[in-house]
Amino acid sequence: MSDRPLRVAVVGSGPAGFYAASALLTADPPAEVDMIERLPTPWGLVRLGVAPDHPKLKDVSRAFERVAHRPGFRFFGNVELGTSITHDDLTQLYDAVIYAVGAQTDNRLGVPGEDLPGSWSATQFVAWYNGHPDFQDLEFDLSGERAVVVGAGNVALDVARMLALTPEELAPTDTTDRAIDAIADSGIREIVLLARRGPAQAAFTTPELKELGELAGADIVVDPADLELDDASAASIVGNTNATRNIEVLREFATREPAGKLRRVVLHFLVAPVAIVGEDAVEGVEIVHNELVAEGERISARATDRRETIPAGVVFRSVGYRGVALPGLPFDQARGTLLNGGGRVLDESGAPIAGVYCAGWIKRGPTGVIGTNKKDATETVQLLLEDAAAGRLPRTSERRDLAQVLAERGGDPVLYADWEEINRIEKAAGEPRGRPRVKLCSWEALLAAARPDPS
Ligand SMILES: Cc1cc2nc3c(=O)[nH]c(=O)nc-3n(C[C@H](O)[C@H](O)[C@H](O)COP(=O)(O)OP(=O)(O)OC[C@H]3O[C@@H](n4cnc5c(N)ncnc54)[C@H](O)[C@@H]3O)c2cc1C
């Protein structure tokens, strides 16, 4: 085994990438880490997914900044795996590669009318209001009176809440100016959230649910009839703190008299869309009422023959993110993850591919909170270090440098100091307006900020 430090490429700079980098840089002996990111900005969904009115959650980026300043760390933004650099390149350049590329697309509903104008994935809307440079050209028509959000997870709650926030609530956030204006000017008066199963099965967490009842500009509406639990659901929440608290919160919501605020958020359980209807654009959502069926531990929804159409001008589909296959790497289509065992990427026969690992959403699927990725990424690094110690990594004494390879190909990486310049400019623009930052949200603006004119 060579005496030089391990050289590891981490692809993706979200929580999983940074937690993996942290575990590598603090290993004994420490490894060297090059982090490769397709965007000019780091932090993945912490910057571009987490709702802007949750600034405390975005503070985790401070921990990532400390990781980035450790000796042995380099950041290569504006470098996309699959275009600027390939998996084969990385296996030539590094002793090991950890893929932490997240889940880059969303699940489909699979109903007619899903692609009508006005039917959007939550992924698109979230990326737009958070300033993702690939999504700024989207035009959301929020002039209709009703928006329907399909889904019962925290992302669906984020979307419903963002649509309901007042200009005063949005003003101190880093939501893009365009999104703040569009939400302030929107004609939406009612936001209906559709949950396929009952309140006991909803995936949202209690603090996020509670927030819906604390909005300055929107009443919360829940039908008490939706909260009558069948025997299986009642039994299923015993010992499940989150579900029990959710039901308590929902029951309290159901007792409320609307205060006559500008908007209403309506939570509707046991209903699923069967079609998104409209001539040339969304005009409504046809729903079916469901009943619950218990099969062992699993409580699933079964359609009844009761249907109705909810008129709506816009629909947001929030039924889960999904990982995308990476060129040259085995993919588990059913789970939407790289084929892996605990973070070791496996070939089709189930054997580990030497030196190739994964962490975060591309390893376990799009579940859990930011912190879940810490344990997940640390476990992956543990396996990598075990493999290194056992001589299972393909190590050679001579390796070329990524910077040199990119330069030869005419690449234009955004290094960590370049990102710090973007960060400084964004924060300076936010400061006088009492905002954490005003995001630069086009590729041109981001790259121009990263390469200040020397004159
Ligand atoms: C809308 C939304 C809201 C959320 N809100 C919360 C919350 O309030 N609290 C909470 O705890 N958790 C929240 N989460 C969950 C949290 O964001 C995730 O657990 C976490 O971001 C997953 O980390 P990751 O590193 O696996 O993926 P990501 O954060 O998605 O990072 C992946 C990174 O890889 C990069 N990448 C992708 N493909 C390539 C490629 N080919 N080449 C190079 N780079 C690439 C991406 O640009 C991205 O930067 C939220 C998630 C979403 C979607």
Image (cartoon, grey):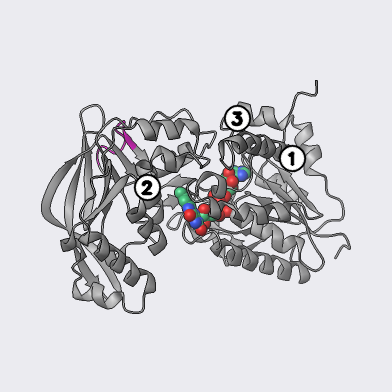
Q: Secondary structure at mark 3?
A: helix
Q: Which residues are magenta?
A: 112-119
Majority secondary structure in the magenta region: loop
Q: Are marks 1 and 3 in contact (CB under 8 Å)?
A: no
Queried whether the magenta region covers residue 118, the answer comes back as yes
Residue 206 located left or right of residue 369: left
Queried whether the magenta region covers residue 206, the answer comes back as no
Question: In this figure, which residue is indicated by the disc labeled 2?
Answer: 161
Residue 289 screen position, x and y as percent: 16, 55
Q: Residue at x 67, y 39 (%)?
A: 423
Tell me which amino acid carries mark 1.
Answer: Leu
Tell me which amino acid carries mark 2.
Answer: Arg
Question: Is 183 above or below relative to 386?
Answer: above
Residue 367 located left or right of residue 404: left
Question: In this figure, which residue is indicated by the disc labeled 3?
Answer: 443
Real-space Cα separation, disc 1 to disc 3, in angstroms: 15 Å
Lower sequence index among marks 1 and 3 = 1
Q: Is residue 332 visible?
A: no
Where, by quadrant of the figure, is residue 113 drawn? top left
Mark 2 crowdedness (10 Å alpha carbons): few <14, some 14-19, many ≥20: many
In what quadrant of the picture does the N terminus appear? Answer: bottom right
| Frontmost residue, 97 versus 278 | 278
Lower sequence index among marks 3 and 2 = 2
- Observer-side mark, 1 or 2, equals 2
Real-space Cα separation, disc 3 to disc 2, in angstroms: 28 Å
| Frontmost residue, 102 versus 70 | 70
Q: Residue at x 49, y 32 (%)?
A: 177
Question: In this figure, which residue is indicated by the disc labeled 1?
Answer: 415
